[in-house]
Amino acid sequence: MPAPSAAAKTSATRHDMSVILVTGSYDHEIRFWEAWSGICSRTIARTGESGQVNRLAISPDKRLLAAAIHKKVNIYEIASASSDPLVTFEGHTMNVTSVSFHSEGKWLVTGSEDGTIKIWDLRTSHLHRTYDNVAPVNDVCIHPNQGELISCDQAGSIKQWDLSDNICSHELTPAGDVPIRSVTLASDGSCLVAGNNKGQCYVWKLNEENTGLPRFQAVTRFFAHGKYLTRCLLSPDVKYLATCSADTTVKIWSISSNFEFKQEKILIGHQRWVWDCAFSADSAYLVTASSDHTARLWEMSSGETVRQYNGHHKAAVCCALHDGAG
């Protein structure tokens, strides 16, 4: 996430390489931050509207922010100063726990404690499809091929949903009924990592259907945290895994070519639970959000905090970062 280089000559290019950093909190506010100065540049106060912010996602073109707020999803225009959403997606009956954009920004996928996964068409603003997972959904990610979803739930299951066939095609239950809290897919589709409520991480190699090998091939598992694990996230370059926990730390694990995970660093500084994290496009920085009301920007090479973002009045529980090409 370096400052714009000489290559960013035109204002259009410079805007394209801009850094969008957003946090959401139990104080109901959504805040945009200047990554390097630490200044809050914009607050969506949501006055008169109830519901805490659970998850945030930035569209690939940097135009839209999706905010999962209690049972609904608000879509905000990032370049606008308005605190009013462009559109609101309503249909979930309980907390929305995850939100992700399709790579071309055509649709949005959400998961909820109501046991459903929904796909929303951003062009028509309508609900496109609902998958019935039954158990409360804790996290959903989109496969880089954009044709499959991977979800995890409170009953301990990880499921692959095929967008073309409209079915659940694979199911994994690595630890019986221990709830799976978070799932993350490698940007190259090579592996899947899942973290559960007991701090355990499970890793699968993903094989193509035509290889004759199992789609999900278990390769390793390891104990990441002694307390509740809240988020696991693979870096864009697939060289690192970040795990966030109730133990106030974030751990950074290096990944070898044969999927061996080795603890590289422990990021220490937050005073309470760390809920969420987001990598910079070049995998050199990590943003984290914590119950201590702050977010932090960490430099991966040193493991040090380079910026702290102060302004939320309650727990900061979600963050999103987009500093790549829009």
Image: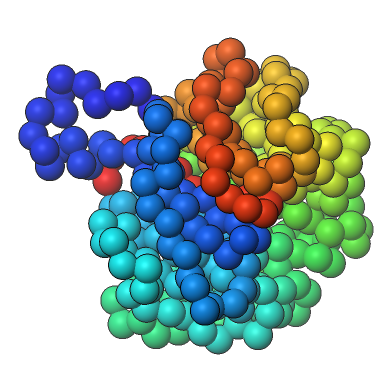
Q: Is residue 133 above or below residue 9?
A: below
Horizontal relation, residue 162 to residue 180: left or right: left
Give the image quarter of residue 241: top right
The residue sitting at 52% across, 50% down in the picture is 23
The tally of labels here is 0
Residue 194 in view (yes/no): no
The residue sitting at 12% across, 42% down in the picture is 12
Q: Is residue 34 above or below residue 91?
A: above
Snapshot colouring: rainbow
Task: Farthest residue to the left: give it.
Answer: 10
Give the image quarter of residue 38: top left
Q: Is residue 93 above or below residue 117?
A: below
Rendering coords of residue 257 (x, y %)? 61, 22
Rendering coords of residue 130 (x, y %)? 56, 82
The residue sitting at 78% across, 74% down in the picture is 135
Rendering coords of residue 245 (x, y %)? 77, 41
Task: Farthest residue to the top: give it.
Answer: 302
Residue 64 in view (yes/no): yes
Of residue 166 and residue 266, the one placed in the foreground of this image is 266
Horizontal relation, residue 144 to residue 296: left or right: left
Of residue 17 and residue 262, the one placed in the foreground of this image is 17
The residue sitting at 29% across, 61% down in the picture is 81
Horizontal relation, residue 166 to residue 245: left or right: left
Q: Is residue 291 above or below residue 95?
A: above
Horizontal relation, residue 65 to residue 171: left or right: left
Rendering coords of residue 304 (x, y %)? 60, 18
Quadrant containing the N terminus is top left
Of residue 43 and residue 98, the one placed in the foreground of this image is 43
